[in-house]
Image (cartoon, rainbow, N blue to C red):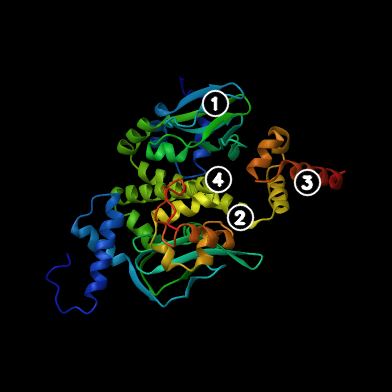
Amino acid sequence: MNQIDNAYYPYVQANLQRFFPVNEEQSKFLMPYLKVRQFDKKTIILNEGEVEQHLSMVVKGLVRKYVKKSKKDTTLQLATEGHLIDSEISYLRREPSPVIIETIEPSILVSITYDDMQEVLEKMPGANKMGRLLLTAMFMKKDERLYKQLQLSTRERFLEYIQNHPHMLQRVPQKYLASYLNIKPETFSRLKHLIRKQSA
Amino acid sequence: MCTNHTGILNLDLTCRMLAGFQDYFGRYIDLADEDIRLLSGLFETRIYDKKVRIVEMGEVDQYLSYVIKGLLRKYFVRDKEEVITQIIKEGEIVVSSVSYFSGNPSRYVVETIEPTTVVSITYANLEKLFSMGDKWEKMGRLMMADFLVQKEYWLLDNINYSPRQRFFRFIKEQPELLKRVPQKWLASYLNIKPETFSRLKLLAGGNGNGVDSEGKIEKLTR
């Protein structure tokens, strides 16, 4: 694990600004707490039952969060550049993780440990507000996804996702995408062929 | 704070409200009497009959509410069918959260099941509260963390447990709601087919006795 250097920090800072304003002083305060972690593809970063120590931002690569079941895995999140990923329940409640976090591509993450986060919350002016805004954003995103899963039809879910994330069809193995969208693999293939025909 | 107030008409309501603040917000930060007074000034009491929609789909939810008394449900409509995503009882928070926090139109309806009393805070007043000091920001942060964790649990429960397991977990954790909530709504909330729900209820002997948390029947009473 390396100290974050100038190569990644501007990127992280820019992405944090999407959640809340970060002033110069806070920025300087935060930087020493951030660590760079690099992983090969198909590497388990956090296993089920482990306690999550890191809240991470993907700087490069693609990371998957999923639940392992005897019959099939259920993909809960596909995090690409600029996205945050952690086992929320485990990180926030200090409980064994119910989910697995694994890279799909070789990935670089910028992370803050739980203990360092507590120190930041205690010592940095404005940290509680940042935390609140960050959690609000994460909560709304989760609610949004849940709503789409429940409200949209299979076809609508597929089209909506492909429209908003066209590059993901190339980057993510089809079975993971199908699982993420809660679509049967054979239905997913059919829908994919359908849009190919239409765009041809 | 509720002692020595005699002859006030709404004493019971006031006491419940103050106790509610202590119970709900006091779990996140230490609250002194003056903090409770501050909260009281920012919240307003709202009283509803049963089956009243307090948030309509498409309107912005103006209030985050603590339920003092009563029971509510939150749902959206899919193909003319109501899909219930939350059942909220005394001591819990009810809000069409994304609408409230973002100012966008609500995708959910919030409706009372029983006659209900809530104390509510507008988003403007909540922001005012947060601006009154870092301890309130801390409270807001911890509250949002709970919101997030609860949502994740709900999601995982739906993935990890079968309808049967969801049913038995629910009646073990909230047995009183089996009597208070009409069956079709509970079935919708637990994402269980109504006929399956009836069968499971019969199996549980109507009140869930004799089952463990995994939903295995330990002892059949009939």
Q: Horizontally, is A184 left or right of A63 in the view? A: right
Q: Which x, y percent locates residue A184?
A: 70, 44
Disc 2: host chain = A
Mark 3, residue position: A191
10 Å crowding of disc 3: few (<14), some (14-19), many (20+) = some
Q: Residue at x 53, y 33 (%)?
A: A100
Co-location on one chain, circles 2 and 4: no
Q: Which callout, 1 or 3, points at the residue further toward the start of the chain?
A: 1
Q: Are marks 1 and 3 in contact (CB under 8 Å)?
A: no
Q: Secondary structure at mark 3?
A: helix
Q: Mark 4, mark 3: which one is toward the viewer?
A: 4
Q: Amino acid at mark 4?
A: Ile
- Determine whether, in the image, residue A168 is placed left or right of residue B177: right
Residue B38's x, y, as percent?
25, 62
Instruction: Determine which residue is flagged by label 4.
Output: B159
The residue that disc 2 covers is: A150
- Distance, label 2 to label 3, CA atoms, is 19 Å
Q: Chain of mark 4?
A: B
Residue pointed to by mark 1: A44
